[in-house]
């Protein structure tokens, strides 16, 4: 059974500035022998209905602007996997999602930035499933549940988002924002308790939820990853610290071996 992960990818600069999380992802990646493929759900590919990346050689998409020039030279040249994309499509259709293949889409930075640390050799096939526009927390959990059988086929399911994601406040603080720390603590407690009901209602229950996530798309991949796991699986925290004072990089793993 391949692991399921939620990884905070923060800002695109995480590709060049590994901070606390990068080395921990690298250590985890070294334990992932036998992974057949990686399926990524990222907030940077949102579509009408669900789309499944089926390109055999997806391009590296630099879907951001105003960042240091070296970021635009980075390439993550892992192959795609049309065969597994078709399997994912059938699972989504069976679960009642409106879904189709996309044979032209490249990988966005929500996929390739964390993978540069997790699987830097880019040898394992990587494909993506989009987030459908208008998805809510219950829908995100259901999306993960639909994709869960792929883990038994050796596919690592990776929800790539950000535990906090208020870009309006990036660079405005010299110290870690108390609200971001409080929100991250609340989420950690709910994840470790496997309290899906609380996480589904995080917008109402979590402290500073709307400040931590002015919009929801970077939180939803956490619920996709959780949905892909079994009730018996316990989460393990991957410490990531806070970047730019407001972006919590905390991440979670299910079914992965412990690393230092």
Image: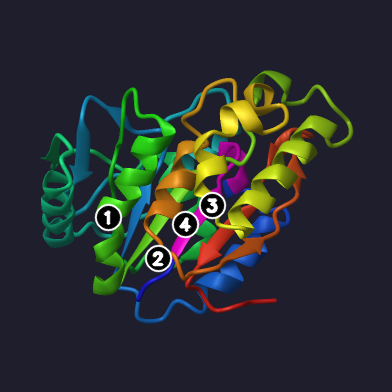
Where is residue 121 shown, x and y percent of the image? Answer: 43, 68
Q: Which residue is mark 3?
A: 7
* Residue at the farthest right position: 175
Q: Badge 1, how many Cα within 10 Å: few under 14, some, many 20+?
A: many
Where is residue 211 shown, x and y percent of the image? Answer: 68, 22
Query: Could you tell whether 246 is left or right of 143 in the image?
Result: right
Query: Could you tell whether 87 is left or right of 252 in the image?
Result: left
Q: CA distance from mark 3 to mark 4?
A: 10 Å
Q: Which residues are magenta?
A: 4-14
Q: In terms of depth relative to the viewer, which is nearer, 79 or 216?
A: 216
Q: Which residue is mark 2?
A: 230
Where disc 3 sits, the SS reads strand
Foreground: disc 2 or disc 1: 2
Where disc 1 sits, the SS reads helix
In the rendered image, the vertical position of residue 43 relative to residue 221, given as above or below: above
Q: Of callouts 4 and 2, which one flags the residue occurring earlier in the amino acid sequence? A: 4
Q: Which residue is mark 4?
A: 115
């Amino acid at each position: 059974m391949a692991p399921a992960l939620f990884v905070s990818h923060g800002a695109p600069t995480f590709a060049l500035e590994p901070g606390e999380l990068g080395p921990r992802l690298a250590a985890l990646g070294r334990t992932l022998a036998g992974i057949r493929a990686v399926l990524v759900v990222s907030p940077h590919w949102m579509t009408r209905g669900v789309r499944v990346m089926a390109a055999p050689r997806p391009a590296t998409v630099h879907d951001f602007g105003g960042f240091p020039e070296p970021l635009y030279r980075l390439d993550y040249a892992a192959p795609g996997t049309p065969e597994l994309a078709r399997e994912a499509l059938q699972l989504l259709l069976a679960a009642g999602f409106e879904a189709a293949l996309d044979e032209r889409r490249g990988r966005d930075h929500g996929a390739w930035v964390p993978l540069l640390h997790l699987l830097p050799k880019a040898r394992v096939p990587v494909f993506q499933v989009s987030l459908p526009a208008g998805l809510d927390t219950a829908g995100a959990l259901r999306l993960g549940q639909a994709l869960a059988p792929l883990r038994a086929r050796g596919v690592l399911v990776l929800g790539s988002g950000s535990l906090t994601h208020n870009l309006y406040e990036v660079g405005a603080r010299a110290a870690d924002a108390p609200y971001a720390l409080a929100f991250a603590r609340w989420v950690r407690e709910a994840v470790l308790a496997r309290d899906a009901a609380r996480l589904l209602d995080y917008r109402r229950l979590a402290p500073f939820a709307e400040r931590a996530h002015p919009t929801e798309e970077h939180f939803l991949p956490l619920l996709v990853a959780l949905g892909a796991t079994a009730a018996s699986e316990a989460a393990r925290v991957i410490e990531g610290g806070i970047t730019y004072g407001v972006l919590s990089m905390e991440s979670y793993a299910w079914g992965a071996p412990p690393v230092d």
